[in-house]
Image (cartoon, rainbow, N blue to C red):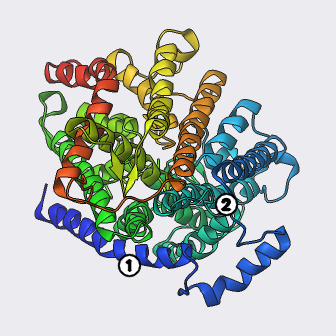
Amino acid sequence: MTSQDFIQVILFFAILIGLTPILGNYMYKVFTGEKHLMLPVFGWLEKLTYKFSGIDQDEETNWKSYTFSLLMFNLIGFIFVFLIQLFQSWLPLNPANLPDVSWHSSFNTAVSFMTNTNWQGYAGETTLSYFVQMLGLTVQNFVSAATGIAVLLAVLRGLSRKTTDKLGSFWTDLTRSTLYVLLPLSILFSVVLVGQGVVQNYKTYETVQTLQGAPQVIPMGPAASQIAIKQLGTNGGGFFNANSAHPFENPTPFSNFLEMLALLLIPAALTFTYGKMVGSTRQGWTIFTAMLILLVIGLSISLYAEYSTNPIFGNLPLMEGKETRFGITNSVLWSTSTTAVSNGSVNAMHDSLSPLSGMVAMINLMLGEIIFGGVGSGLYGMVVFIIITVFIAGLMVGRTPEYLGKKIQKFEVQMAIIAVLAPNIVILLFAAWASVTAPGLSSLNNAGPHGLSEILYAFSSAAGNNGSAFAGLNANTVFYNLTLGIGMLIGRFGIIIPVMAIAGSMAKKKITPSSAGTFHTDNWLFIGLLIAVILIVGGLTHFPALALGPIAEHFLMNNGVTF
């Protein structure tokens, strides 16, 4: 690494830390109904939305009604995106005359964007029309991200309120998250991206002559608007097949820096919002610190692995699969960040990462996408690990575990365990199934441990609602479209439902004042314990599979064996 690389990494984290309280405080005002910057701009649209939809913005519901509204809204979104793909050739804004999408790919894509996964088993510019990209995928980019924020807000009300069963209104939370947070940031970011050279038009595809004289089709389209929300909403689905390695999506080093920052911006800022809403900013900064430490550890290991030399590769740092425009540091910073925040966008080929660097990306997924994680989802996923941590701490000191003055009892621990197990069951069982059946093995691009890593990564990405891939795996088959789609559903709603049950249970509890015997959850001791629990749970669950995949590949590669 050069001094410029070190400066960029430090600058990246410094800006992220600086923006966290600014955006976090703004979102606190939005979600608590206080006056804020965007109220005069979009306030009329919020009122019009409630009037048109027949919603009473002040009507609050219990956790079951809140969850039911969420599930029905997401079901409608799935059906819409599924159908417009099936009938794409009959719909407008299809200048390339693209045909209808297969039923299994339509199912996978509809589930993917509805669950905020944005896994893509297809090439965007040769598969989906402008109509589907805009009215299907881009809309889901907004509302799936807003759904994650809504669940977090319900959890925060459950933690901060007492002796009530009311957790707010899903419709109000969804509307405010979209209008006041995601929409204005996306508009601003879209304009900046267009200024950097990201395409935004409705032209038909251009045919040009290459230097060799052969014709080449250059795709066009409204890319900037989708790129903005794919990054800010931790979605990740690219307008083009090469995602953010494509020069029309990510043309300059500055656009690359901004897109990486956008990955982490809202998830990081929500930790500050978290602290404000529970009445203690120290709680928010404690969670932020734990997340940042895990991210920096993963980044350090990845950078070490990518810059390490090996005789097999001519004793040079690994540039395979990376854009020369960005280099190793930007590629690794992106791969670590995108897998930490459940985004799934890429600016380099993850399949070409060194075994250890690929393992770090995979571990970020396997831990449950809680290292900042998806918008909203990362933080409520972290709450699950906090509950397990305070439960373990209570066992160690012989006290009833408490968090924010509320007792953690049998029901909360049971729901937390279900939320932890759901995605891990998908990863291990589905990957094992794919590893021993012909449909699963037929899609592999590599043999040996790297082939296993491709399968493990795919199901980890689906269960973690991430969307990135070791793209050597051909996942656009009936087997993978269906199994990965099911994995995405379990990874999303297998966590949301138990988390909402926890929120409903916690809201009914009384708040016990802090005393001399209270186990504090806003200090370095708790940060260390929380990180240890996260790593132990992830390690015990996935170490055997990782040992057969990237770890075995690492040792074999050092002995001159590649796959």
Q: Nearer the viewer, residue 126 or 298?
A: 298
Label at residue 22: 1
- For image coordinates 88% across by 49% down, the residue present is 90
Q: Describe residue 554's horizontal placement relative to residue 366 as left or right.
A: left
Tell whether label 2 touches label 1 (CB within 8 Å).
Answer: no
Whole-Å distance between the Cαs marked 1 and 2?
25 Å
In this rendering, is residue 251 above or below 380? below
Q: Residues within 10 Å of mark 2 (few under 14, many from 20)?
A: many
Q: Secondary structure at mark 2?
A: helix
Please state the horizontal and vertical placement of residue 520, each as a whole percent of the image.
24, 56
Residue 295 seen in render: yes
Q: Residues within 10 Å of mark 1 (few under 14, many from 20)?
A: few
Q: Secondary structure at mark 1?
A: helix
Please state the horizontal and vertical placement of residue 162, each as a whole percent of the image.
51, 61
Q: Quadrant of the C terminus?
A: top left
Q: Describe residue 201's horizontal placement relative to residue 563 as left or right.
A: right
Q: Which of label 1 and label 2 is nearer to you?
A: 2
